Image (cartoon, helix red, strand yellow):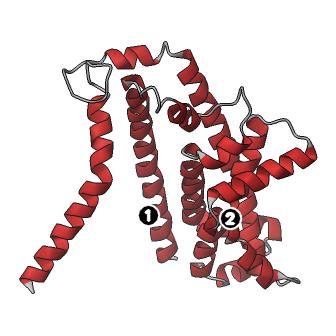
Amino acid sequence: MKNRKLMDNLCLILVFTFLFLPILVLIIFSFNSSSLNIIFEGFTFSWYKTLFSNVTLLESLKNTLIVAFTSTIASTIIGTISAYALYKYNFPFKKFINELLYIPIVIPEIVLGISLLCVYTLLQLELGLFTIILAHICFCIPFVIVSVRTSLSSMNPNLELAASDLGASRFKTFFYVVLPSLLPGILSGAELSFTLSLDDVVVSYFTAGPSSTTLPLKVYSMIKTGVTPDVNALITIMLVIIFSLLMISTFISLKGIKKEGTR
């Protein structure tokens, strides 16, 4: 029994090492004094200063954040309302729509990217940030619906009945009773949408215009010539910010779950 537990712990350590070691190497090489990401020659903060003078890199970051925040907000709102409607009401083709939601999740991104490009071509839409945002909303909505629907399944249905009995309208019941109960699922769906949008390459490649290069596309284009350490510095800053936001959202989610358990 002890040997089995030891092997389980060893496997767990190896898995986490495999997952997080590349991230650790990236952070270390952001302080590398050499311009080549091959050998660590010395410690320096110069690449963090160089980063803020790299106009094209900062422009691609700005495009990425615009796309990520806009698509996350839109997909979270649409996904939350859609999940509630699919859970609460019965209507024709409901089962078919439920099954249809998983298509953007399971199909390869290249299929979705080419399909959206064909649609944009038929509609004669000029490729740019707008088309990227529409594409990201398209593949983020199902993830939000799945996440929110999980919270809906664990929500006490008597809460809505109690609010109605006390004279609350449907609008007030949804915003003051249902929405706070769904907050953990909404936050999870928003985080997942933001992450998917932030690092998407394939769909963005097919739906981006010449002046709407996102950060993943910019880094991908630098692979042939070599990724400079200022990119590592930028990614390190993003990791710190995302990790901080993740800790805050986790705290809010745990607080919401605890509050729901108290009820």
Residue on which disc 1 sits: 254
Residue positioned 69% across, 70% down in the render: 103
Question: What is the residue that sits farthest to the bottom in this orientation?
Answer: 1
Depth check, front residue: 10 or 72: 10
Residue on which disc 2 sits: 104
Position of residue 63 measured from the top left corner of the image (x, y, whole percent):
64, 31
Disc 2 packing (10 Å; few <14; some 14–19; many ≥20): some
Q: What kind of residue is marked 1?
A: Leu
Position of residue 244 measured from the top left corner of the image (x, y, whole percent):
41, 43
Tag in front: 1 or 2: 2
Depth check, front residue: 106 or 5: 106
Question: What is the residue that sits farthest to the front in this orientation?
Answer: 224
Position of residue 153 measured from the top left corner of the image (x, y, whole percent):
61, 80
Element carrying mark 2 = helix
Residue positioned 27% across, 48% down in the render: 21
Residue positioned 52% across, 73% down in the render: 260
Question: What is the residue that sits farthest to the right in this orientation?
Answer: 123
Q: Which mark is residue 91?
A: none
